[in-house]
Amino acid sequence: ELYNSQTLWLLPGGTPTPLGSSSPVKVECLEAELVVTVSRDLFGTGKLVQPGDLTLGSEGCQPRVSVDTDVVRFNAQLHE
């Protein structure tokens, strides 16, 4: 099965370490795409970031967001 849903955080020195569910950013690696989910309370301060202020990649992958949600999602095809 080509699916891995694990949130990783890079420690100093670049060592990846799995994080618990409290991470504000979650990355799902699917067969043909990456799905990145970002909490709008990105910094844990209670102040929500605006979806338009977030980008993914040099091409500026546009976020997919609903008005009534507290997360922003990006879908990026693996070949993009």
Image (tube, helix red, strand yellow):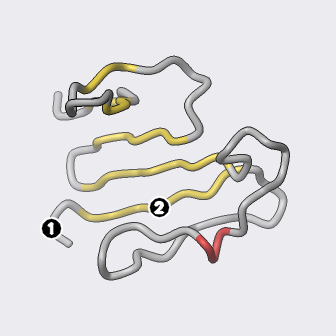
Residue 17 at x, y percent in the picture:
32, 20
Give left or right: position of 57 versus 50: left
Residue 48, quarter of the rendered image: bottom right
Residue 31 at x, y percent in the picture:
21, 46
**Quarter holding the N terminus?**
top left
Residue shown at 73% from the left, 38% from the top: 44
Identify whether 59 is placed above or below 29.
below
Residue shown at 63% from the left, 77% from the top: 52
Residue under label 1? 79
Work out how far the residue at label 1 is from the one at label 2, CA to CA, in angstroms.
15 Å
Residue shown at 33% from the left, 64% from the top: 76
> Sequence order check: which comes first, mark 1 or mark 2?
2
Residue 47 at x, y percent in the picture:
83, 53
Secondary structure category for the residue under label 1: loop
Say which amino acid is labelled 2: Phe
Residue 67, quarter of the rendered image: bottom right
Give left or right: position of 65 versus 5: right
Say which amino acid is labelled 1: His
Q: Nearer the viewer, residue 60 or 68?
A: 60
Give left or right: position of 52 versus 48: left
Residue shown at 61% from the left, 73% from the top: 53
Identify whether 13 is placed above or below 77.
above
- Classed neighbour count for the residue bearing mark 1: other residues with Cα under 10 Å, few (<14), some (14–19), many (≥20): few
Residue 22, quarter of the rendered image: top right
- Count numbered badges in the picture: 2
- Classed neighbour count for the residue bearing mark 2: other residues with Cα under 10 Å, few (<14), some (14–19), many (≥20): many
Residue 26 at x, y percent in the picture:
47, 39
Task: Residue 74: give its label.
Answer: 2
